[in-house]
Image (spheres, rainbow, N blue to C red):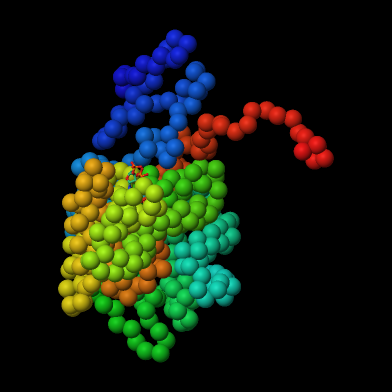
Amino acid sequence: MSDEAYRLTSPDGSEMELPVRKGTLGPDVIDVARLYREQRVFTYDPGFVSTGSCESDITYIDGEQGILMYRGYPVEQLAEHSSFIEVSYLLLHGELPTGAQLEAFDNTIRMHTMLNEGMLSFFKGFRYDAHPMAMLSAVVGSMSAYYHDEMDASNPEHRDIFSHRILAKLPTIAAAAYKLNIGQPFIYPRNDLNFTENLLHMLFAVPAEPYEIDPVAAEALDLLFILHADHEQNCSTSTVRMAGSSGANPYSAIAAGISALWGPAHGGANEAVLNMLEEIGDVSQIGKFVEKAKDKNDPFRLMGFGHRVYKNFDPRATIIREMCYRVLQKLDRKDTPLFDLAQELEQVALKDEYFIEKNLYPNVDFYSGIIYKALGIPTSMFTVMFALGRAVGWTAHWREMISDSKTKIARPRQLYTGPAGRDYVLVDKR
Ligand code: SDX
């Protein structure tokens, strides 16, 4: 705790000191925990633009410098040298694994990819065209029914088993949802395949013929999962922390995070970007849509642009744009209209006064969908892919929250603007 403090003088002249706390990096925080008790006032910050909700060692973002680090390692270095399974170990345990630890962790994940057969029956109840995010959230929530007895959150072993099940089973559930959507049979996972190879196998293999995994696709997905793995106290991660803070079964807390991610202002933006690009259709229409995005009376926003924290380039968008080019090249895609359109849209927007003044840059969702589409993954599955990467971040934050002795149930207050007290009026008097 630092000796520095902010001094607050209330309208009636009373004073109090609000202590300042310093982290390893980033802005200091003003500790307002005593404010209501001593001054009988709340802070007010809809959307938590200026509010730190917790202390965390997991991920650091600098929105001005465009910095993203997992446990202190720059995401660019992890993207270049690591794998999603290794990054998952890092996020969950705080340190890069030794060779032996990585092998054991990878093997554990491979051994937990199957679902309880009863879970597969849920898919018989969904309409064939149910959105895969709705199915993912529902089936992950049902895991709390299957594993309720082995979930003592105070037991570190149970926390590890929960973490392994989430990481290992979400791809199987996601692939099952996709197979329902396309009317193909569910494909069981294989233990001889690594995390991304197994996902591709479960998505695209059919019983009628052998399926050959494209290493370009496996490598691209692994990198995308690394880039989506965690991102500080974003909307869905904060949802997982809030749900978990009541002591709710953590599978239900992860299901709540999946639901929060689905919104187009958050992880649903990657699906919205592709729909937007297809609506724009041609570079000749870009100007019209950029003007719509600037029009206060028009609800249209340039999806995949802007960010609560990044007021410079989202470092993930930079890596994904370069990867987009490489993947399309490796897949020998000569005809890349969507990628060409996205790049032109980016150039036009970044030169526009409105976007410059409001610091609106491409975010992680702007280019990711173009890669997913090039790999044969349908638009409706884009946010599911985001969830498969982010699930380990949600899990790491749940573990940090639940094992912190200072954790209290998250219960914010409000500014009440409703009617003052009034008496009930009998219906025949109204
Ligand atoms: C993710 O938090 C995270 O870390 C999220 C994420 C993660 O990894 O978890 O990074 C993943 O969710 C990325 C964001 C994906 N969403 C989109 O691409 C949807 C389009 N973007 C916007 O809806 C918006 O930019 C947000 C939601 C991302 C951020 O919104 P903020 O921080 O609440 O900012 P704001 O809405 O107050 O915008 C500031 C100004 C506003 O204009 P004024 O009211 O000041 O006049 O910028 C404008 C907005 O109208 N603006 C946009 C815009 N984004 C913001 N105008 C046009 N197009 C846009 N995309």
Which of the 4 quarters of the picture holds residue 246? top right
Name the residue at the bottom extreme: 208
Give the residue displayed 33% in from the left and 83% down from the top.
Answer: 211
Q: Please provide percent x and percent y for residue 342.
A: 24, 63
Name the residue at the right extreme: 428
Q: Please provide percent x and percent y for residue 25.
A: 25, 35
Number of marks in picture:
0
Report whether 193 appears left or right of 422.
Answer: left
Give the residue displayed 52% in from the left and 33% down from the top.
Answer: 414
Report whether 88 appears left or right of 182.
Answer: left
Screen quadrant of the C terminus: top right
Give the residue displayed 45% in from the left and 28% down from the top.
Answer: 43
Answer yes or no: is residue 115 visible. no
Which of the 4 quarters of the picture holds residue 268? bottom left
Report whether 51 appears left or right of 281.
Answer: right
Which of the 4 quarters of the picture holds residue 33? top left
Answer yes or no: is residue 400 visible. yes
Q: Please provide percent x and percent y for residue 146.
A: 57, 62
| Above or below: residue 2 compared with residue 131 | above
Give the residue displayed 36% in from the left and 34% down from the top.
Answer: 50
Screen quadrant of the N terminus: top left
Q: Please provide percent x and percent y for residue 208.
A: 40, 90
Q: Give 383 or 81, whichever is nearer the viewer.
A: 383
